[in-house]
Amino acid sequence: MYDPKSSKATEFIDDQVIQDYIAYAEQNKNNRELVDAILKKAAECKGLPHREAAVLLECELPEEKERIFALAKEIKQKFYGNRIVMFAPLYLSNDCVNGCTYGPYHCKNKHIRRKKLSQEEIAREVIALQDMGHKRLALETGEDPVNNPIEYVLESIKTIYGIKHRNGAIRRVNVNIAATTVENYRKLKEAGIGTYILFQETYNKKAYEQLHPTGPKHDYAYHTEAMDRAMDGGIDDVGCGVLFGLSPYLYDFIGILMHAEHLEAAKGVGPHTISVPRIRAADDINPDAFPNAISDDTFEKIVAILRIAVPYTGLIISTRESKEARRRVLNLGVSQISGGSRTSVGGYVKQETTEENSAQFDVNDNRSLDEVVNWLLELGYIPSFCTACYREGRTGDRFMKLVKSGQIANCCQPNAIMTLKEYLEDYASPDTKEKGEKVIAEELKHIPNEKVRRIAAEHLTELHNGKRDFRF
Ligand code: SF4
């Protein structure tokens, strides 16, 4: 029986309820009166429950679709302004004992090169990332209790935080590792991680079990209940995600919103972020073999309606998406993107040859970080390297209260400007620097609080004079 407060996966993600709401959305996709009423409610910017969000996603009425996109843009602007937070993934190891049928790391793939970075190699990768200008990483490993035990992950986090090359520093390490125990989550918390990220892949239990036929990941309940354990271990910020294309998209769309509602009901705070990857080509993986793969248009709608349904949750896209696909979703709701990413193990130091192939997926946006920053500036965004909230203890419900009241803008806007200034001073090409300075001068005016605006202006001068790392 569906119970968002339950600690059991099959009760907070209820298959029958999802099936019923898929049918409900199908029946009402042209029900103008209902869609109008849902949009009116959504305009209050307090989010939408999964049942109503599903109706919007299926809506086929052209003018209502226009209104959905317009509202998503409005909400994006209200909560996130023009800011886009930058990050990069760091792959530590692709050893994996699972048998996933859609990811190249699966243990039966014999032509992928297996690699695990030593601490010295991690240090070199981090220096390369710092020299690009990155401050925020998402650390990734395959699931392998023998080769990638929690001790290896903890040691790696320590190495990453310990490296200060020139003016560089990694100030926030988010961690994307397999579902684990409360005890291990507690250790990650103590190691100072930012967000714990785990993609559900698909919420459909039957499909999930077929897609993960062997290995510890096969256990649907253990995987789906991981965020609860992470929060029990003291991690306030968790990041959810599905891999769109594994199951019919509407099922996973409802599933991820149910998961968010569960975390809010059971733990008092919803997910910090939601990632929206899609099935992509990779070694041993042909996307044509996935009949549920989604089009760009559907992808856009998913992003827009997630923005409306969970306005307080950051939305993330990676370099799996092409430049054009990323451009299309940026103003609809995406608030974080990766840039200059390498998805191979050790790829920041050494570009791989085809024979060396160790990547998790093919990157569709191959631009350097500077090119991505330059492009964002051209499109009118502020690329932000901010990591302030977790360093200031603004996590979990404390963070959510600030977001819900809109007060976070007094932190995000100056922090975005100041971290962009750091980037321009230390890493940008002359053209990016010129564009960035113009954006900073303009965006400084949009800091709501006068005192904060004045202090930010002072810090910009200090940054120009060589000081670093200011934050609100
Ligand atoms: S101030 Fe907080 S919410 Fe805003 S960009 Fe920085 S870390 Fe994120």
Image (cartoon, grey):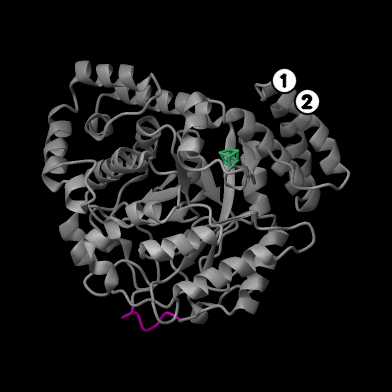
Give, as a three-letter code, the residue at label 1. Answer: Glu
Q: Position of residue 150 (x, y in %)?
A: 46, 72
Q: Position of residue 177 (x, y in %)?
A: 42, 64
Q: Indicate the quadrant where residue 460 lies.
A: top right
Q: Position of residue 376 (x, y in %)?
A: 62, 41
Q: Would residue 363 be seen by someone viewing this image from the given angle?
A: no
Give, as a three-letter code, the residue at label 2. Answer: Arg
Cα separation between marks 1 and 2: 6 Å
Which residue is label 1 attached to?
450
Residue closer to the observer: 305 or 135: 135
Residue 110 is a magenta residue: yes
Q: Are marks 1 and 2 in contact (CB under 8 Å)?
A: yes
Quarter that holds the C terminus: top right
Quarter that holds the N terminus: top left
Residue 144 is a magenta residue: no
Mark 1 CB lies closer than 8 A to ligand 1: no
- Mark seen at residue 454: 2
| Local secondary structure at mark 1 | helix
Q: Which residue corresponds to the image point at 39% horizontal and 51% vertical from the top-left?
A: 231
| Local secondary structure at mark 2 | helix
Q: Which residue corresponds to the image point at 74% horizontal and 45% vertical from the top-left?
A: 432
Residue closer to the observer: 163 or 343: 163
Q: Which residues are magenta?
A: 107-113
Q: Which residue corresponds to the image point at 38% horizontal and 30% vertical from the top-left?
A: 308
Q: Would residue 335 be seen by someone viewing this image from the given angle?
A: yes
Q: Position of residue 173 (x, y in %)?
A: 56, 58
Note whether 175 is above or below 24 in the view shown: below
Q: Quadrant of ligand 1?
A: top right
Q: From the viewer's perspective, tell me whether residue 181 is left or right of residue 444.
A: left
Overall secondary structure of the magenta stretch? loop
Note whether 465 is above or below 413 in the view shown: below
Q: Indicate the quadrant where residue 246 lies.
A: bottom left
